[in-house]
Image: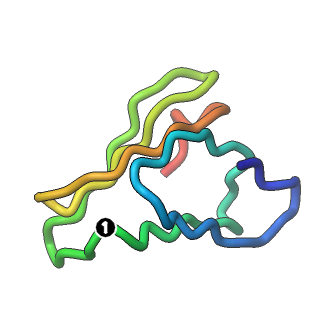
Amino acid sequence: MTFAAGARGTLKRLTAPFTGYLSGLTTKNSVDLVDLAWTRQSMTATYSGTASGGTLTVSNGTNSVKLNLLGDYSTAS
């Protein structure tokens, strides 16, 4: 899934596991992890990668979702 330059939108993740790649993300885009329950004070997000891509892992302390990213997100917050 590639977000076009200047696009605004939400990707709703409906199936697990997500095996594709995301690219072109900006602050105007979002990913809705509908199958990962929000757990107050337990949510974490970690990124492991290089300038060409990596993995964003979001966890609620019990379950986690891994998103494969293409592009340089190593300095993103």
- Residue 72 at what x, y percent from top left? 63, 32
Query: Residue 11's quadrant in the figure?
Result: bottom right
* Residue 55 to residue 28: above or below: above
Amino acid residing under circle 1? Leu
Who's the residue at 55% across and 64% down the image?
31
Q: Relative to 56, does residue 25 appear above or below in the rendering?
A: below
54, above or below 65, in the image: above
Residue 57, compared with residue 11, is above or below; it is above
Residue that badge 1 annotates: 36
- The percent position of residue 51, horizontal first and vertical second, equals 60, 23
| Residue farthest front in this picture | 15
Q: Residue at x 87, y 62 (%)?
A: 6
Percent coordinates x, y for residue 13 in the rendering:
51, 64
Q: Residue at x 71, y 68 (%)?
A: 28
In the visual, does 4 lie left or right of 61?
A: right
Decide if residue 75 is on the left or right side of residue 22: left
Question: In the rendered picture of this protein, how many numbered marks are placed on residues?
Answer: 1
Compared across the picture, whether 42 is left or right of 59 comes to left
Q: Label 1: few (<14), some or many (≥20) within 10 Å?
A: some
Q: Nearer the viewer, residue 46 or 9?
A: 9
Q: Position of residue 22 (x, y in %)?
A: 63, 45
Q: Residue at x 69, y 43 (%)?
A: 23
24 sits left or right of 57 in the view: right
Q: How is the image coloured?
A: rainbow
Circle 1 — which element? loop
